[in-house]
Image (tube, rainbow, N blue to C red):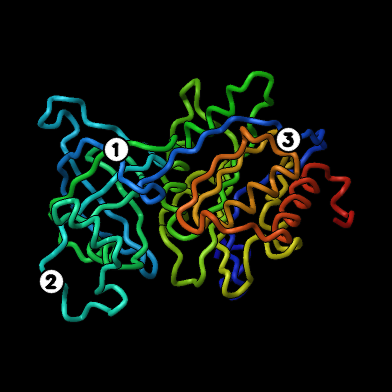
Amino acid sequence: SSRTSSRASGVVEHPRRGNAFTECGLVRQQQSSRQETQLYAETKQAPQYQKQDAILRKVEPTGKGNFLLHVDYERSNDNSGEAVLEYQPGNVLALEIESPASLKDTTPAEFAVMNEKTKKDLTANGGWLRGPYTVSRSTSSGFQILIKEVGYKSHVFAEAEPGTPVKFGGKFKVPIVEGILNSLELEGASRTERVVMVATGVGIGPCVGAIETMVQEVDSASSYSGRIDLLASFRTEEDVAMEKDLNRLAAEYPQRFQWKSIISSKVGRISGNQESLESYLKPNDDGDSKICSVQNTHYHLIGNGQLVNEWKAGLEKAGVPSERVTFESYFNTMSEADMSAVENIACIVKKLAVPERETAQC
């Protein structure tokens, strides 16, 4: 096997030739006026958007309770004559599906009942279920979205037959790759040498699409050509999603991409202790001395809001410029950060920025 650690350990690493960290100056956190776009789920009323017809061509299981929705639509023009929206990994859109007259008798109880919020919105939307979803991939015929089956609405999507009509619309959030490239263009900023993505659960979906874009589009003048590392946290081994896609990318681009699946039920949270966190963040050594974990590494955080909040705070404390941190929270957005996790992140990021500190105590 090409894996450097077994599933029994709770961490699976798909190696590529890594890089060593060079000494770099630690700088104070730069202040920014970053604005966050409110999503449909975070607002009291849904934003208005032009609805477009589409077909749910395929529902692809990938990991326990995870489903990749393949949505196809006409890419030229909609009925209004306006150009149809184009999406990239990380864009957020509204996706709708008609509520069925009844569910299968075998439907688990936790998926069979709508909550009051869903019932109210279903009535307001003419019998169609809807919600905000983050695009995982843009395809020649449409887009793909990775979902977790957690309730009535997601269950309806997961159980839909191929060819089921759906509707979509709206375009929110900056795509992942665009956010990373924006940091390359900052005046006076050092070149981005490494991208670290930290994802939980189905947050891995948009990361896969963004990674595919970055490793395949290297000829563009504005493209990113550096290292990419993905830390993907799942509760159990069975929950791991899109594993084949990630293994394929790691095999095809071994000099550029590496990923690790971290099973929290076995090894705890990514930032649970400093020793483990350091092993996750420190790539293999291939003699590359240009990377600094503070000055020229871009971090993208996506998934559980508590994890996102902890990493944002930890990276800020470590001195990572705010422009080098992009993020999206799926849930738990108001959760307070665990300060021990914040300290662990800050300590290890600073430690890896200066090799001489590798033997020092945080």
- Mark 2 in CB contact with mark 3 (< 8 angstroms): no
Which numbered circle lies on residue 29? Answer: 3
Measured Cα–Cα span from mark 1 to mark 3: 34 Å
- Name the spot of residue 199 as percent of width and height, x first: 52, 54
- Mark 2 in CB contact with mark 1 (< 8 angstroms): no
- Name the spot of residue 105 as percent of width and height, x first: 16, 80
Residue at horizontal 48 percent and vertical 35 percent from the top: 177
Question: According to the image, label 1 marks what residue?
Answer: 170
Q: Amino acid at mark 3?
A: Gln
**What SS does tag 2 mark?**
loop
**Quadrant (top left, top right, bottom left, bottom right) of the C terminus:** bottom right
Camera sees residue 293? yes
Q: Residues within 10 Å of mark 1 (few under 14, many from 20)?
A: some
Relative placement, left or right, of 117 versus 200 is left
Relative placement, left or right, of 118 versus 324 is left
- Name the spot of residue 196 as percent of width and height, x first: 60, 45
Please report whichever mark, 2 or 1, sits nearer to the chain's N-terminal start. Answer: 2
Residue at horizontal 70 percent and vertical 42 percent from the top: 316
Please report whichever mark, 2 or 3, sits nearer to the chain's N-terminal start. Answer: 3
